[in-house]
Image (cartoon, helix red, strand yellow):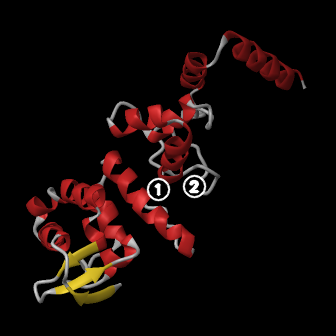
């Protein structure tokens, strides 16, 4: 971060948005509801990169995490953890946030902002591509059509990665209830996969 005498009009316009975001993060629960939309504007417009403090200092940030953690009025005095919690399940904002944080990776400061909320369970937390952030990055680079559906709320990141054949579909059922296991597997498996399963189970029972 650097600060210098203001000499351009744009940073002054950015300052209002930055101050509003900082105030919302410090506010009550009702005020926090405004954070996701404010954060989306700050990220989309790049307001965090250059703005004017109330004392007339021109502040510039190279990395978004630095902007978040720097105390007011040179930053918003928060943490990525709080930002993540307040944004919640707003995948469109999480995608913008991830893009901003990825710019830090060139400096060795790549940060995953959200753990995968796997809707079907069973994926190891640290397996390659197991985080929603990594999933969004892959979709952004390889399947922007699916990413658009994710940010629109039509698909979860996990469902999009399954559709793109980058993850196996998983099911989670109580193993002590064979009828539920059977129904869950039959619903998800093709006829050929069902026959293979029957053969495998029969072979195990015969041993």
Q: Is residue 123 above or below residue 192?
A: below
Q: Nearer the viewer, residue 52 or 123?
A: 52
Residue 113: tell me if it is visible: yes
Do the residues bearing badges 2 and 1 touch, measured as CB atoms within 8 Å? yes
The percent position of residue 203, horizontal first and vertical second, equals 86, 21
Residue 89: tell me if it is visible: no
Q: Say which quarter of the image contains residue 74.
A: bottom left
Secondary structure beneath disc 1?
loop
Q: Is residue 7 left or right of residue 127?
A: left
Q: Nearer the viewer, residue 8 or 157?
A: 8
Residue bearing the label numbered 2: 125
Q: Nearer the viewer, residue 20 or 128?
A: 20
Q: Name the residue: 26% across, 58% down.
A: 45
The percent position of residue 120, horizontal first and vertical second, equals 50, 37
Q: Is residue 47 above or below residue 146?
A: below
The percent position of residue 87, horizontal first and vertical second, equals 28, 56
Q: Is residue 43 above or below residue 143?
A: below
Quadrant of the snapshot with the C terminus? top right
Q: Name the residue: 53% across, 52% down.
A: 134
Residue bearing the label numbered 1: 115
Q: Name the residue: 44% across, 38% down.
A: 147
Tell which residue pokes out farthest to the front in this image: 7
Q: Say which quarter of the image contains residue 23.
A: bottom left
Q: Is residue 96 left or right of residue 170?
A: left
Dot 2: within a 10 Å radius of its alpha carbon, few (fewer than 14), some, or many (20 or more) residues? Answer: few
């Amino acid at each position: 971060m650097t600060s210098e005498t203001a000499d351009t009009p744009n940073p002054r316009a950015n300052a209002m948005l930055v101050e509003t975001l900082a105030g919302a993060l410090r506010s009550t629960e009702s005020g926090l509801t405004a954070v996701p939309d404010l954060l989306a504007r700050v990220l989309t417009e790049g307001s965090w990169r250059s703005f004017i403090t109330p004392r007339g200092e021109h502040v510039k940030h190279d990395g978004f995490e630095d902007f978040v953690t720097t105390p007011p009025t040179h930053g918003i005095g928060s943490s990525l953890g709080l930002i993540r919690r307040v944004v919640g399940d707003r995948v469109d904002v999480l995608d913008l946030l991830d893009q901003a944080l990825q710019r830090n990776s060139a400096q060795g400061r790549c940060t995953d902002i959200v753990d995968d909320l796997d809707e079907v369970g069973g994926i190891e937390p640290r397996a390659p591509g197991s985080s929603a952030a990594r999933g969004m990055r892959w979709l952004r680079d390889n399947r922007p059509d699916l990413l658009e559906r994710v940010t629109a709320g039509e698909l979860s990141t996990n469902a999009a990665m399954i559709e793109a054949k980058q993850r196996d579909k998983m099911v989670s059922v109580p193993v002590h209830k064979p009828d539920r296991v059977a129904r869950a597997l039959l619903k998800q498996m093709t006829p050929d996969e069902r026959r293979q399963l029957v053969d495998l189970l029969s072979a195990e029972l015969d041993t």
